[in-house]
Image (tube, rainbow, N blue to C red):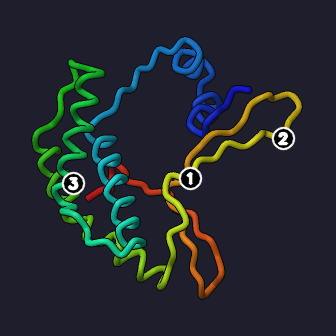
């Protein structure tokens, strides 16, 4: 049985032709940009911060980790599309802002949830779609699941950055 992700379904509902090109013909047009590299780097750092907190570990140099992840993501994009040009000013600003933002991740989680327990990061979803006409499974990942003992609730978090307000 094949699967479908939220992104694929969204693309199909938006433009069936674009869906065909990307998912059936495997002609991917979007390879990434500065914003996707930034978001991926921050996503990785967020996971490590929460895992270190849950394991009572001393955090590694998170600023250096962000820098390394950001540069590696930019290199991956450049490999996929050698013609892509990155804006030096934007990259410089993103590097600075990313290093600044990471200090707020754990305090924001603690302020919002109080005491919380890590349940999982990158929780894989692979669920049947209940429709006899569709022989597919829904595939996705949940970025973070935490449990708050005081409320006895599980909370699902999807890390997001955006191109209009990342700073």
Residue identifier under label 2: 130
Real-space Cα separation, disc 2 to disc 3, in angstroms: 42 Å
Q: Which mark is residue 123?
A: 1
Residue identifier under label 3: 65
Picture quarter with the N terminus: top right
| Number of the front mark, 2 or 3 | 3
Which of marks 3 and 1 precedes in the sequence? Answer: 3
Apparent side of residue 55 relative to residue 147 in the rendered image (left or right): left
Real-space Cα separation, disc 1 to disc 2, in angstroms: 21 Å
Q: Residues within 10 Å of mark 2 (few under 14, many from 20)?
A: few
Q: Are marks 2 and 3 in contact (CB under 8 Å)?
A: no
Q: Residues within 10 Å of mark 3 (few under 14, many from 20)?
A: some
Identify which residue is drawn at 44% across, 57% down: 159
Q: Which mark is residue 62?
A: none
Badge 2 marks a residue whose secondary structure is: loop
| Residue 86 picture quarter | top left
């Amino acid at each position: 049985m094949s699967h479908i992700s939220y992104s694929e379904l969204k693309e199909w509902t938006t433009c069936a032709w674009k869906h065909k090109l990307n998912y059936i013909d495997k002609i991917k047009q979007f390879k990434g940009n500065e914003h996707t590299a930034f978001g991926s780097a921050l996503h990785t750092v967020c996971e490590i911060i929460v895992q270190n907190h849950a394991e009572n570990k001393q955090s590694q140099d998170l600023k250096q980790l962000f820098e390394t992840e950001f540069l590696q993501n930019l290199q991956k994009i450049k490999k996929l599309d050698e013609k892509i040009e990155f804006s030096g000013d934007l990259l410089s600003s993103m590097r600075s802002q990313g290093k600044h933002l990471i200090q707020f991740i754990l305090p924001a989680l603690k302020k919002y949830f109080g005491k919380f327990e890590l349940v999982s990061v990158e929780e894989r979803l692979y669920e049947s779609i209940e429709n006899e006409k569709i022989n597919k499974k829904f595939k996705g990942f949940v970025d973070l699941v935490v449990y708050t003992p005081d409320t006895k609730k599980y909370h699902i978090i999807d890390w997001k950055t955006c191109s209009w307000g990342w700073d």
